[in-house]
Image (cartoon, rainbow, N blue to C red):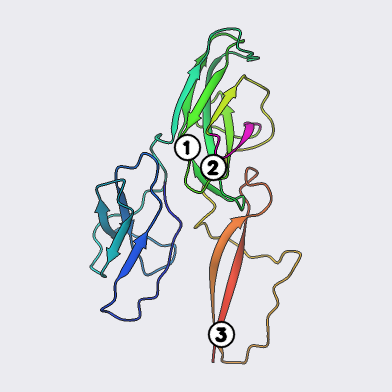
């Protein structure tokens, strides 16, 4: 999984930047990418490759980057560990039986979607069985949402099963009816909105003199409304002005 973006203004060529992050479950290494353009990581932005999942710091002295760009999707299944089918008579109400697929979505305390698991599947051959799902705690997650489908890779509404509160990382799915909810397509962090609209509390601006230069940037992007319905986002904008 990717981290959120972090920024440092390097004001002296002889300084160094120390990066520190939280260890990711199952990680055996990390790749660090650096860019001078926020949110834009081209074909040659790889700063270094770290060969240990336990190493969670790096000292960047400003050395040149090399060929490499961040992946667009998470292709691992490491934090969604297992889906185990029970024996008959475990309270299942599956209709229909057959192969079912699951994915887990992780959310932080602000309601932002911060990570999605890869898919896991089980052939439910008896309607009274249950499927026990188990995953590894995702960094900074406070809740998880479970999604299920019979069409691999397609989690459009209704696909929602249940919400699980951290630190619980297991769920017994008995085949209860799916309810409204679509698996988010991308993490909320680092995804700039295409447009800015004022909410119930419009932004207040002071008088800006003609010829005065203004700088605008996204401070943080968080969810607005229910993230499983279209993954809407709202942005907090900070403004700096200089004459």
Q: Which residues are magenta?
A: 158-168
In what element is the residue under mark 2?
strand
108 within the magenta span: no
Circle 3 — which element? Answer: strand
Lower sequence index among marks 3 and 2:
2
The image quadrant of residue 15 is bottom left
Which residue, given by chain and number where applicable, does mark 3 sit on? 241
**Quadrant location of residue 82?**
top left
Are there few (<14), some (14-19), or many (20+) residues within 10 Å of tag 3? Answer: few
Where does residue 224 sit, x and y in percent of width and height?
66, 54
Residue 45 shows in the view: no
Q: Are marks 2 and 1 in contact (CB under 8 Å)?
A: yes
Q: Badge 1 is on which residue?
A: 117
The answer to which of 14 and 43 lies nearer the viewer is 14
Residue positioned most to the front: 167
Q: Earlier in the sequence, mark 2 or mark 1?
A: 2
> Neighbour class for label 1 at 10 Å: few (<14), some, many (≥20)?
many
Q: Nearer the viewer, mark 3 or mark 2?
A: 2
Residue 148 visible in rendering: yes
* Apparent side of residue 118 relative to residue 55 in the rendered image (left or right): right
Q: Nearer the viewer, residue 228 or 57?
A: 57
Q: CA distance from mark 2 to mark 1?
A: 8 Å
Quadrant hosting residue 14: bottom left
Choose mark 2 or mark 1, whichever is in front: 2
Q: Which residue is mark 2?
A: 106
**Between disc 1 and disc 3, whose residue precedes?**
1
Distance Cα–Cα, label 1 vs label 3: 42 Å
Q: Is residue 154 above or below residue 224?
A: above
Residue 30 vertical position relative to residue 43 in the rendered view, above or below: above
Left or right side of 113 for 43: left
Which label was assigned to residue 234?
A: none
């Amino acid at each position: 999984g990717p981290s959120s973006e972090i920024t440092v203004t390097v004001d002296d060529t002889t300084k160094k930047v120390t990066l520190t992050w939280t260890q990711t479950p199952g990680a055996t290494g990390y790749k660090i990418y650096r860019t001078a353009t926020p949110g834009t990581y081209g074909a040659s932005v790889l700063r270094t490759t770290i060969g240990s999942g336990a190493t969670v710091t790096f000292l960047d002295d400003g050395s040149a980057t090399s060929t490499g760009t961040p992946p667009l999707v998470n292709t691992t299944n490491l934090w969604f560990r297992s889906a185990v089918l029970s024996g008959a008579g475990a309270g299942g109400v599956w209709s229909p039986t057959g192969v079912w697929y699951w994915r887990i979505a992780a959310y932080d305390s602000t309601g932002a979607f911060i990570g999605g698991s890869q898919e896991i599947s089980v052939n439910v051959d008896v309607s009274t069985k249950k499927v026990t799902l188990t995953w590894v705690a995702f960094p900074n997650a406070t809740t998880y949402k479970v999604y299920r489908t019979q069409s691999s890779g397609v989690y459009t509404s209704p696909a929602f099963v249940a919400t699980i509160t951290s630190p619980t990382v297991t769920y017994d799915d008995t085949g209860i009816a799916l309810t409204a909810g679509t698996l988010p397509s991308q993490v909320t962090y680092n995804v700039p909105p295409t447009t800015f609209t004022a909410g119930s509390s419009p932004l207040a601006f002071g008088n800006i003199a003609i010829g005065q230069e203004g700088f605008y940037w996204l401070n943080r992007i968080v969810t607005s409304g229910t993230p499983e319905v279209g993954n809407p986002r709202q942005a907090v904008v900070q403004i700096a002005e200089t004459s």
